[in-house]
Amino acid sequence: MKTITAITLILGVSTASLGQTLSNEDQISAAVQAGPEEQRDNATVLGYDSSGALVELRKGTNELICLADNPEKAGFSAACYHVSLAPFMARGRALKAEGKSRKEISEIREAEAKSGALKMPDRPATLHVLYGKEAKYNSTTGLVENANLRYVVYTPWATQETSGLPLKPMVPGGPWLMFPGTHAAHIMITPPAK
């Protein structure tokens, strides 16, 4: 306990705010729980090596790509997305690694999508997010506990007029269109937390 306290004082951070460091197998098991059950066994999984670098942990054979929880961030957040979103997701990660802000990332991807340099899906494509501030992977049960799911269906360039969707939820957890008219237009569905 004294060692943890000393580390907290020296670094100025609380170890309680750090995420979980999981084995490759546990990263895979946890990450795929964000996706549809019937697609989990054959999904590609990206996760983190011992240096914190993002690497491919498993090459899949279907259209689902899952991203493991980042152990350097508090809470839990894993995502699975359709392969047609891979260029969009990879570009966002690359720009973030360059130190770009969220606004800059959005502006750069918007310009690249408009020019055709960034390939966006030509039909709706879904991102599933399993998340929670108190969520944790239980290696004994093999389950992510205390987590919620959110669904993001990307429909580039969609507007309220072309989709019929509201621009804010009409009921708790109801679908709505976020960033209408842009490359990142998407239907948000956030079921109420458990």
Image (cartoon, rainbow, N blue to C red):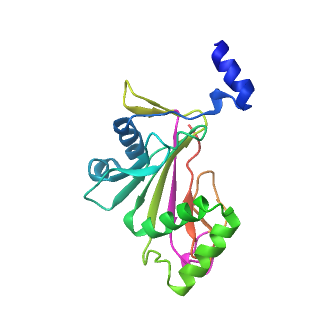
| Image quadrant assignment for residue 10 | top right
For the point 54% across and 80% down, the residue is 113
Left or right for 82, reference 178: left
Seen as rendered, the residue at the extreme top is 2
Per the rendered image, the range of residues in magenta is 146-165
* Quadrant occupied by the N terminus: top right
* Quadrant occupied by the C terminus: top right
Residue 9 counted in the magenta span: no
Expressed as whole percent of the image width and height from the top left, the position of residue 186 reads 55, 67
Seen as rendered, the residue at the extreme bottom is 115
**Does 49 appear above or below 62?**
above
Front one among 149 and 13: 13
Expressed as whole percent of the image width and height from the top left, the position of residue 48 reads 45, 45
| Image quadrant assignment for residue 26 | top left
Residue 149 counted in the magenta span: yes
Front one among 44 and 135: 44
Front one among 90 and 38: 90
Left or right for 85, reference 104: left
Expressed as whole percent of the image width and height from the top left, the position of residue 100 reads 66, 64
Left or right for 88, reference 65: right
Report if residue 35 is visible in the image.
Answer: no
For the point 52% across and 38% down, the residue is 147
Expressed as whole percent of the image width and height from the top left, the position of residue 108 reads 62, 75
**Does 76 appear above or below 40?**
above
**Does 162 appear above or below 155?**
below
